[in-house]
Image (tube, rainbow, N blue to C red):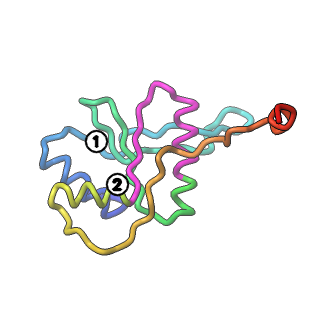
């Protein structure tokens, strides 16, 4: 099977080792449409685990591309709230490979993994706080 990135191949090896049933990029989700209703953007998660009804996206790219991927996943969750999709960032993926012996620990400094997919910032009404002081 041809994978878009070596990290996807490694993840597939891990799933195979543990006899986890998986499918590679089985479905594309439309996330934007033009004025006549034709899809203009789609998101295709890397893996689907049918036994868990879970999609997995592997992201080991540079931060600029990770931001775009986060936007796509946020849009997927808005449009398809019943679809479960987890994202593995570079640090998550590296730690997983080390944990299961597929890669040696190294001294490479990896970026911190986000604790959640970024969303709109919390808005604080400063005039309410100023009036209370």
* Residue carrying label 2: 92
Who is closer to the viewer here, 78 or 89?
Answer: 89
Residue at left offset 34%, top offset 73%: 108
Asked whether residue 88 is drawn in magenta, I would say yes
Asked whether residue 62 is drawn in magenta, I would say no
Q: CA distance from mark 1 to mark 2?
A: 21 Å
Q: Within 10 angstroms of label 2, few (less than 14), some, or many (20 or more) residues?
A: some
Who is closer to the viewer here, 97 or 36?
Answer: 97
In the rendering, at what x and y percent does residue 119 appear? 61, 42
Q: Residue furthest front?
A: 133
Identify the image quadrant of residue 67. bottom right
In the rendering, at what x and y percent does residue 80 appear? 52, 29
Q: Residue furthest top?
A: 82
Sequence-earlier tag: 1 or 2 = 1
Could you say which disc has been placed on residue 23 in the image? 1
Q: Please indicate whether residue 2 sits to the left or right of residue 128 in the image.
A: left
Q: Please indicate whether residue 104 sits to the left or right of residue 114 in the image.
A: left
Which quadrant does the C terminus fall into? top right
Q: Please indicate whether residue 22 sits to the left or right of residue 55 in the image.
A: left
In the rendering, at what x and y percent does residue 104 appear? 19, 69
Element at label 1: strand
Element at label 2: helix
Q: Within 10 angstroms of label 1, few (less than 14), some, or many (20 or more) residues?
A: few
Determine contact: label 1, label 2, CB under 8 Å: no
The relative height of residue 66 versus residue 51 in the rendered view (above or below) is below
In the rendering, at what x and y percent does residue 81 appear? 51, 27
Who is closer to the viewer here, 31 or 53?
Answer: 53
Q: Which residues are magenta?
A: 69-90
């Amino acid at each position: 099977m041809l994978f878009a990135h070596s990290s996807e191949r490694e993840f597939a090896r891990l799933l195979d080792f543990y006899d986890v049933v998986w499918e590679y990029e089985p479905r594309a989700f439309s996330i934007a449409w033009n004025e006549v209703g034709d899809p203009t953007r789609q998101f295709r998660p890397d893996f689907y685990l049918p036994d868990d009804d879970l999609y997995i996206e592997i992201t080991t790219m540079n931060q600029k591309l990770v931001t775009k991927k986060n936007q796509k996943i946020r849009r997927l969750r808005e449009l398809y709230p019943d679809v479960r999709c987890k994202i593995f960032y570079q640090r998550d993926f590296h730690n997983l490979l080390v944990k299961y012996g597929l890669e040696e620990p190294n001294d490479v400094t990896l970026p911190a993994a986000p604790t959640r997919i970024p969303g709109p910032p919390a808005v604080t009404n400063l005039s309410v706080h100023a009036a209370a002081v």
